[in-house]
Each structure stands twice: as structure tokens, then as C-alpha cells.
């Protein structure tokens, strides 16, 4: 029988992978720079004036480098504190996506549309960050007519949503009366959906909710306004 890995073990393995990618890229750069500093004097090229010029330029560019240094500091904080790892779904400043790469200066996300989203690390550290791991929350709402059997509506919607592929099987769907609107009783649905196909699941869920209510002969009202003309 193969070795079984729990969620914690898997996350530790992914964390190790994230750290190894980070350190391997930076160690490679350090080795190249060190080799150049050793080899150039042997070729008769003096590196002391070059280092002095770099120091002078660094002094003048200090303020301009402040933002980059903030990103590097934030990157180190992310690497060592591990608020998220490669494969997690995070939501930050109104943007959400799956973490693909964590670099010293920036973090790279991707979404369902295969867009690459680059967020500089200084905009991550210190902000409110939501990490939902592989899933993200799906919130829907539907109104039914006053006088409808809400228990039957909830049961029909729950049964239909169980057929949707991509909703979490580990977390139960939350469904119930959300509010009493002007023209309808609004039923709220909260479920966990795979982040990699979130919008596909959202659209399919809306369709099955509508079908469930139609099959149960429960009407979905449209907004109505009563106008009285006084003599």
C-alpha cells in the first residue's frame, strides 16, 4: 500500500517546492556574479573602479530603489512566513487567482481565463489577504414569490446543486432565506467552488437553480410597483 499524505504533509511539500525554486534562482545569480568578480582580475580587468562606480551610482539611486527594496523585503516575509504557497487561491485588493510563482519582488497569479496577474509583493504584505487554498467562495441569490413553499424551494435547489461538477464535496452547501425583499423572498446560496473554473461553475449553478424552481412550480417574481392615483 502506498504512503498516504494528509493535507498538512502536502502543504509542507508544496512549501518546500516554493522555497527551493526561490533559493535556486537567487543562488544561481549569486554564483554568476561571484565567478565574474573572481575571473575578471585574472584576465587583467580591474574590478575596483567598477565597484566604486557601482557604489556611487547606488548612492544616487537609493531613493529610486526604495520601492524595489520594499518589494524584496516583502518577498522575504512571504517566503519565510508562508501566508500562501504555490497552488493556493488568494484574494488581494479585489483580485483573486491561483498562485503560480513566488519571486523576491513579485508574486504571479493566474485565473480561469489563463491571464497572468503580477502583484508586487509590497502590495501583499500588510494588506488583508484571503487564502482559500484550492477553492473560493461562491455566493448566489434567487428570489421566490411570497406565498411560495420556501422549504420545497430550498430542497429543490440543494438537490440540483449536488449535480454540479466542481463544487466542494468536503464543505456542505449553505442555503436559506437571506432577506424579505419588496417583491420576493430572497434565498441565498453559499458554496465552495474550484477556483480554476469558478465562473463556469457560477453560470452552471445559476442555470440549475432556475431549472430547480421551474420543476418545483415555484415562481420567480419580477419587481412590481403599485401606483395609486388619488382624486
Image (cartoon, helix red, strand yellow):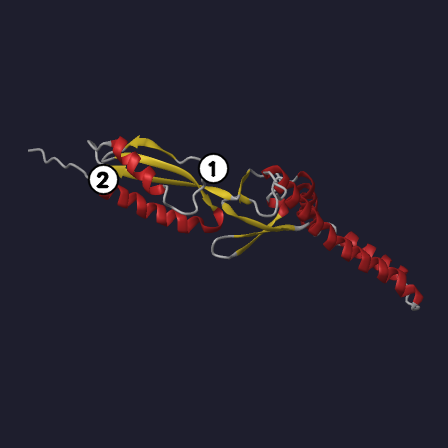
196 above or below 12?
below
Where residue 30 appears, as percent x and y from the top left, is: 80, 55
Task: Name the secondary structure under disc 1.
Answer: loop
Where residue 226 appears, as percent x and y from the top left, is: 15, 36
Q: Quadrant of the N terminus?
A: top right
Where residue 109 appears, as percent x and y from the top left, is: 56, 51
221 above or below 47?
above
Residue 92 in view, yes or no: no
Where residue 8 appears, as percent x and y from the top left, is: 61, 37
Residue 178 in view, yes or no: yes
Q: Residue at x 68, y 41 (%)?
A: 77
Mark 1 to mark 2 CA distance (whole Å): 27 Å
Task: Report the number of discs.
Answer: 2
Of the pair 156 and 92, the residue shown nearer to us: 156
- In this rendering, would 47 be left or right of 161? right
Q: 10 Å neighbourhood of mark 1: few (<14), some, or many (≥20)?
A: few
- In this rendering, would 21 be left or right of 92? right
Counting residues from the start of the chain, the first of labels 1 and 2 encountered is 1
Task: Name the secondary structure under disc 2.
Answer: loop
Residue extending furthest toward the left? 231
Q: Which residue is mark 1?
A: 170
Q: Residue at x 36, y 37 (%)?
A: 189
Q: 10 Å neighbourhood of mark 2: few (<14), some, or many (≥20)?
A: some
204 above or below 216?
below
Q: Residue at x 93, y 66 (%)?
A: 42
Q: Which residue is mark 2?
A: 216
Amino acid at each position: 500500500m502506498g504512503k498516504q499524505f494528509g493535507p498538512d504533509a502536502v502543504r509542507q511539500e508544496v512549501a518546500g517546492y516554493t522555497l527551493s525554486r526561490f533559493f535556486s534562482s537567487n543562488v544561481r545569480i549569486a554564483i554568476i556574479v561571484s565567478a565574474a568578480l573572481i575571473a575578471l582580475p585574472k584576465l587583467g580587468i580591474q574590478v575596483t573602479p567598477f565597484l566604486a562606480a557601482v557604489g556611487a551610482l547606488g548612492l544616487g539611486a537609493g531613493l529610486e530603489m526604495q520601492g524595489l527594496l520594499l518589494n524584496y523585503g516583502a518577498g522575504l516575509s512571504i517566503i519565510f512566513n508562508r501566508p500562501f504557497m504555490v497552488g493556493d487561491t488568494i484574494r488581494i485588493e479585489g483580485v483573486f487567482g491561483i498562485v503560480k510563482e513566488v519571486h523576491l519582488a513579485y508574486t504571479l497569479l493566474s485565473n480561469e481565463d489563463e491571464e497572468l496577474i503580477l502583484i508586487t509583493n509590497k502590495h501583499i504584505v500588510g494588506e488583508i489577504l484571503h487564502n482559500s487554498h484550492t477553492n473560493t467562495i461562491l455566493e448566489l441569490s434567487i428570489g421566490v414569490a411570497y406565498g411560495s413553499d420556501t422549504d420545497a424551494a430550498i430542497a429543490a435547489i440543494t438537490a440540483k446543486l449536488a449535480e454540479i461538477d466542481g463544487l466542494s464535496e468536503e464543505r456542505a452547501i449553505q442555503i436559506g432565506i437571506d432577506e424579505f425583499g419588496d417583491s420576493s423572498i430572497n434565498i441565498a446560496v453559499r458554496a465552495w467552488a474550484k477556483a480554476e473554473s469558478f465562473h463556469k461553475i457560477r453560470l452552471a449553478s445559476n442555470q440549475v437553480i432556475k431549472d430547480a424552481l421551474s420543476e418545483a412550480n415555484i415562481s420567480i417574481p419580477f419587481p412590481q410597483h403599485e401606483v395609486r392615483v388619488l382624486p
